[in-house]
Amino acid sequence: MKHGVALVWFRQDLRIQDNAALHQAVRTAERVLPVYVLDDEGAGAWAMGGAARWWLHHSLASLGRDLAALGAPLVLRRGRSADVIPALAAEACADSVHATTAHEPFWRDIDAEVAEILHAEGRTFTRHPGATLFDPEAVRTQTGGIYGMFTPFANAVRAGPPPAPLPGPKKLHGADAPASEKLDAWGLLPARPDWALGLRETWTPGERTADARMQRFLHAAVGNYGIGRNLPAQDGTSMLSPHLHFGEISPRTIWHASLRAGEGEHARTFRAELIWRDFSAYLLWHHRTLPEQPLRPAFAALAWRRDPEGLHAWQRGQTGLPIVDAGMRQLWQTGWMHNRVRMIAASFLVKHLLISWEEGERWFWDTLVDADLASNAASWQWVAGTGIDAQPFFRVFNPVTQGEKFDGAGAYVRRYVPELAGLPDRYVHQPWEAPPLELRAAGVELGKTYPYPLIGLAEGRQRALDVYQRTVREAAANA
DNA sequence: TTTTGAGTTGTTCGA
DNA sequence: GTCGAACAACTCAAA
């Protein structure tokens, strides 16, 4: 017998379909109260960055329209979750609160506090799976331990398919809604200057477009994913990351749709990326300091360089390494960077410039629309060699080799570094090697229209190898 | 307990 | 131009 009001607390699950929290609320209560709380204080040092706030604004607008159309308008509030949620629950006389589990340490702290208050007032607080394919608490090695490598983790979770998606409600009975704040008043969008033009041209946040993007990808690109995903000039990746981060589409929806789309090797490679996303959340769940501390303690002592000018040049796409600069400018303009280029640009910062991965992590956090605490931290640690990746540290990406291998015709570089567009293919990834005549013909004046490389590639590589080697040796000696 | 095999995405050098 | 080995020797997971 259904009775009463259930509060559905949306966080990083801004969707109607396959939303276990909403599903359970509808199943068990007569009326539902959908709520979103903007809680910068609770997130602390990891409050949402600028690009993510732009996305959040539009995603909330979309979710609000969809919920209202179903019969239960979304209530927006700003403040501490531990104040707002219990207050709204009391105001609406809700006996239960439902949310999708979030894996960030700050959400776990917030949830613990909220749960305690709600319980003390005689209300229930239930968290539901769905943010990941698999419950991070449940995935264990045979001896009950925590996986520290991707492949064994992937083999373990592949043994059983993730749960099938839940259907979304056709209609909602809204509770008598408390007053909502106005989304426009939250100031999530940039005003002066309005840097969001490239974001608007690239993205449409929301559940509907998330689904459309998935369908397009599964029809057009997944069949060649293993190759196409490495070519930044092409549309070979799913670009679902921001939709996934905000939960506009669930990973298990994508998993099962990709199974229907094809059983081939390429679709399997794509699903491996979904497992990587899960693995990052898993690592953060079991290692709360992942965003701030190297997973391998030996690297806490690594002598990173302090180099504000180098960092700034990297951030603005002015390193003099074309593929790196193209990536950093794509990030600045569109809030997103192709994955292959993320690795190259990140490797250049951490290895060639020997600037701490935490500086890169911070910049990505502020500029990526898909900024995700787990994926961002785990990936930076992977590139820096401080994480779970046990591969030897002498793997240093060469930006020229990588550029020639994956952007051979230079189309990606020419798109984002137009001042190099006139160079022939053989110099577009290394303009400093071009003869003066070629440079002049292309309208390139090194040091004026485009910078010289911040550091020689051989020199930077060797410096990184020396410092890493020394760090590893000293750690071994102290052990 | 000890052993064994393997580890997302690389680069360089020399044959 | 292509190919295999070396890089340096670690950590993890399972048998």
Image (cartoon, coloured by chain):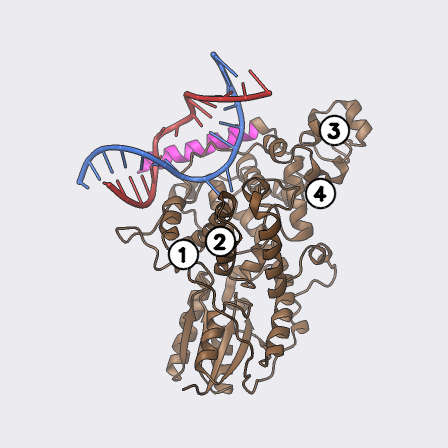
Chain colours: A brown, B blue, C red
Q: Which numbered disc, 2 or 1, marks the residue closer to the eye?
A: 2
Considering the whole magenta stretch, tell me its main secondary structure: helix
Q: Residues within 10 Å of mark 3 (few under 14, many from 20)?
A: some
Subunit of mark 4?
A: A
Q: Secondary structure at mark 2?
A: helix
What's under tag 3, amino acid-wise? Pro
Q: Are marks 3 and 2 in contact (CB under 8 Å)?
A: no
Looking at the image, is mark 4 or mark 1 earlier in the sequence? 1
- Per the rendering, the mark at residue A424 is 3
Which residue is tagged 2?
A259
Residue at image coords 44%, 63%: A164
Instruction: Write the start and end of the magenta stretch as one range.
Output: A459-479
Which residue is tagged 4?
A416
Dots 3 and 2 on the same chain:
yes
Q: Is A468 one of the magenta-colored residues?
A: yes
Give the CA separation, mark 4 to mark 1: 40 Å
Q: Secondary structure at mark 3?
A: loop
Nearer to the camera, A458 or A151: A151
Residue A141 visible, this orientation: yes
Residue at image coords 59%, 77%: A74
